[in-house]
Image: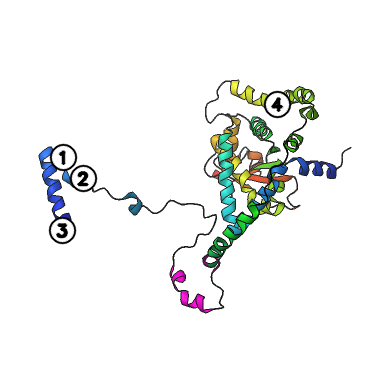
Amino acid sequence: MSQSDHQPEDVASLFKKFGGDAQGYREFADPDAARPSAPVWALVPTPTPTPTTTSTPAAAAGGAAAPLPADAAPAVQAEMPAEVPAAAVPFRPTAPTSVSALWPAPARHEPTQIRQQQPQQSQQSVRPLQASASATPVAAGTRALDAMFARWAGTTPMPAASVGGHGLLSRWRSQG
Amino acid sequence: MISDDVLLQYYERITCSPQWLEFNRALAAELGAGLPPAELRALFFRIGERVAQSMPVPRCDTLEQLQAAFNARWESIGWGFAALQDQGEHLHITHAYSPLAIAFGAPSVDDWAVGFLEGAYQAWFVAQGLPSTLFVRAMSHESGTGPQLQLRLSKEQA
């Protein structure tokens, strides 16, 4: 008899003591074990430990090209330490004057002209937004946009003229 | 009269900062090598959704107001402008002068980067009460990417 076999009795006695329905009792489960892993973007194909990685005799024996993810990662890791120090050596601090040369002249941008033009452009483009925001609120379903959505979705019929020439009397025609 | 070539050259020069151009091109190349175009398009769709949600558009009554609201957002980040045309059974969206082609390369736009605009417009339309049966999808570009991208809001799902 395992401990889990006694658990329902323990639970039943506890519920009997404190009240309640022992039938609704559920054990806590490890959330990681219960759920599949969250979907992630596999931007870089990560090699998974599959039997192919353990079947080294075939790959080690020889010339056959192994799958890319399995072989590429160790090769990169092996090369990186050799190259990084060499690339890090040539760093030499340059004179501070070169830094100031990179950030020279705020006068070049002629801020006066930009300041005169930009507000006008932004006001023009934002004006419809302010107008719509300050307009009286429109109930859902009554705006022109909602009618368009319904028409594009096919939930409302096209205007009679564009449906195909049935005309205003189509209702009676279809009955006859 | 300014020729189209001059306008395009100006657009190519200013539309993506040199600080990020090579990085973006390398990122596009790496993404293209690591993921199929369909997944990249879905990824950029989600990025577009996030950007649109970070720049919400107020509730609009008409298509003209919506276009103005879109363009105010695009202008604020230097992403060109859009024109909306009601075509009866669907909405045609023309987006001009987005930096996608310059930042990621023209082939990337056709293959997957246009998913950004699909996601952005979809999110904005959904916030306006778009029915769940309507989708924004880019149309195939007959004349190459160019400075204009054509999209459609309709029932057709890619």
N-terminal-most mark, 4 or 2? 2
Colouring rule applied to residues: rainbow
Please tell me whether residue A58 belongs to the stretch shown in magenta: yes
- The Cα atoms of the two marked residues, 3 and 1, are separated by 26 Å
Residue on which the image places disc 1: A20
Start and end of the magenta stretch?
A50-70
* Kind of residue sitting beneath label 1: Gly
- The Cα atoms of the two marked residues, 4 and 2, are separated by 62 Å
Q: Nearer the viewer, residue A118 or A57?
A: A57
Side of B84 relative to A157 (left or right): right
N-terminal-most mark, 3 or 1? 3
Mark 4 or mark 3, whichever is nearer to me:
3
* Kind of residue sitting beneath label 4: Ser
Toward which corner of the image does residue A154 lie, by quadrant? Answer: top right
Q: Position of residue A1 (x, y in %)?
A: 13, 60
Q: Are marks 3 and 1 on the same chain?
A: yes
Tell me whether the residue at label 4 lies in contact with that at label 3, contact meaning CB atoms closer than 8 angstroms.
no
